[in-house]
Image (tube, rainbow, N blue to C red):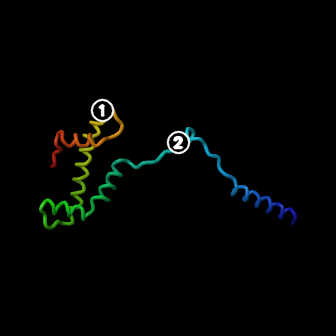
Amino acid sequence: MVKATTEKKAQATKVAAAKTATPKKSSGSQQKRRYEQAPAAVQLDEIIAKNLGSPALKRLARRAGCTRINNGCFRELRKFARRFIEKELRKANALRELGRRQTLTLSDVVLASRFGRTKIL
């Protein structure tokens, strides 16, 4: 009986010590943060699906002169937009590499759109 109570007390002190113990913090040079990123294709698909919803595509179609748009068109329009954005980003990335920089700037994107025009179809 006495042995059982001492075991319970020992276990209670271990639990209390574990709750009050603070973990050691390592310096910034020892601990590196690594963020897992999804492949770029997955991220681009999510961005296009999120930002190019049906209402946005309808507004673009209305600006182009369409009065009605079929539901089957939205998927194809998103595919088309994805291909166009990928081509433009490749050209802008080539300009970034040519300038030996790691940051893609606005001027890279503008110049990429002015250079060889992307074939629409």
What amino acid type is highlighted by mark number 1? Answer: Gly
Identified at 15% across, 67% down, the residue is 68
Find disc 1 in the rendering and name its residue: 99
Q: Viewer-nearest of labels 1 and 2?
A: 1
User: Is disc 2 surrounded by few (<14), some (14 to 19) or many (20+) residues within 10 Å?
Assistant: few
Identified at 57% across, 39% down, the residue is 30
- Residue situated in front as seen by the camera: 77 or 57: 57
Identified at 87% across, 66% down, the residue is 1
**Can you give x and y, in whole percent of width and height, for residue 12 in the image?**
76, 61
User: Is disc 1 surrounded by few (<14), some (14 to 19) or many (20+) residues within 10 Å?
Assistant: few
Identified at 30% across, 58% down, the residue is 51
Disc ID at residue 83? none
- Residue situated in front as seen by the camera: 90 or 75: 90
Would you say 93 lies left or right of 117 here?
right
How far separated are the C-alphas under marks 1 and 2? 29 Å
Q: Quadrant of residue 49?
A: bottom left
Are the two marked residues, 1 and 2, in contact with CB atoms closer than 8 angstroms? no
Find disc 2 in the rendering and name its residue: 32
Instruction: Tell me the SS state at disc 2.
Output: loop
**Can you give x and y, in whole percent of width and height, for residue 104 in the image?**
32, 41
Note whether 100 is above or below 119 in the view shown.
above
**Can you give x and y, in whole percent of width and height, for residue 113 in the image?**
20, 43
Disc nearer the start of the sequence (1/2): 2
What amino acid type is highlighted by mark number 2? Answer: Lys
Q: Quadrant of residue 9?
A: bottom right
Instruction: Tell me the SS state at disc 1.
Output: loop
